[in-house]
Structure formats: C-alpha cells, structure tokens
Image (tube, rainbow, N blue to C red):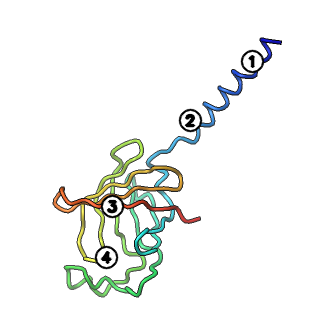
Amino acid sequence: MKSLAGLAAASLILTSATFTSAHAQSANDAVGTWRHPENGSLIRMYKCGPNLCGSIAKVTDRQKVDYKNPNKAKRGRSIIGLTILRARKTGAKKWSGSLYNRKDGKTYSGTVTVISKNTLSLSGCAYGVFCKTATWSRVR
C-alpha cells in the first residue's frame, strides 16, 4: 500500500510541475488588449515582425486627435489606431523600446514586463532618470 501512495504522490508532483511549466509567463503573453489604468483607454498589443507594437483601440476621454504632437503635421491624426508602443524583446518576460504619451505628445524610453497572463507592468522614463510605472489589466 505504501508504494501505491508513493506512486500517487509522485504522479501528483509530476502533474503539478508539468502544469506550472506549461503555464509559465513569457514575453509573448503581452499580446492582447489591455486597459490603461489612468484613463481607461484600451490598447491593443500585437507582434510586428519580431517586435511588439501597441496601438490605441478605444479612448474614454474626449481626445479624438493627436493635438499635443510636437510635429504640427501630425496633430490632426486620429487617436484611434495610433501606434504608441514599439519594443523589442529583451528578456524572458520583457520588452524594451519607446512609448508615446498622447497626453503630452512626448516619446519616452520604456519597458513592458509580463507579470501574469492578465497583468502587465509598463514603465516609462524621461532622460533615463524620471520614471513612472503603471500596472495594466487584460481586457477579455
């Protein structure tokens, strides 16, 4: 009877380890639609070649055009569909690149880190010193 209990325990441990490794997070888990925590906008993250891109899918405020853009020729372009993220894979769960902030029209260096299947951490830095981090949630 002892060997049967030991076999059952070993089987449970093996099954648990397989389940955990099969569901381990990776940088590719950033692909999907995410809610911006400060303004409720929806951002669609997608693969663009080997990189990760993100574009605005929906806004919840009244901003319809990119009026804060420093390039006057771009100030009339629609916010919906605007690409705000371009990043390359820099780790098992991480992307690094540029983040465009439609609120001030500036582009920042930043990172996207996959925390879980439903949570991302985005960090943007100005001058490599002044950084801000936000947690984004997946939209189903």
Give the image quarter of residue 45.
bottom left
Is the residue under label 4 in contact with that under label 3 (CB below 8 Å)? Answer: no
Q: Earlier in the sequence, mark 3 or mark 1?
A: 1
Sequence-first disc among 4 and 1: 1
Amino acid at dot 2: Ser
Question: Identity of the amino acid at label 1?
Answer: Leu
Q: Badge 4 is on which residue? A: 102
Most distant residue in the left direction? 127
The reply to whether dot 4 and dot 1 touch (C-beta < 8 Å) is: no
Q: Nearer the viewer, mark 3 or mark 1?
A: 1
> Could you tell me residue 72's position as x and y percent?
20, 85
Q: Which residue is mark 1?
A: 7
User: Which residue is farthest right?
Assistant: 1
Q: Which circle marks residue 40 in the picture?
A: none
Q: Whole-Å distance between the Cαs marked 3 and 1?
A: 50 Å
Inspect the image, locate mark 4, and give the three-letter code of the amino acid beneath it.
Answer: Arg
Label 2: which residue?
Answer: 21
Q: Which mark is residue 86?
A: 3
Q: Quadrant of residue 41?
A: bottom left
Mark closest to the chain's N terminus, 3 or 4: 3
> Going from the N terminus, do you reach mark 4 or mark 2 first?
2
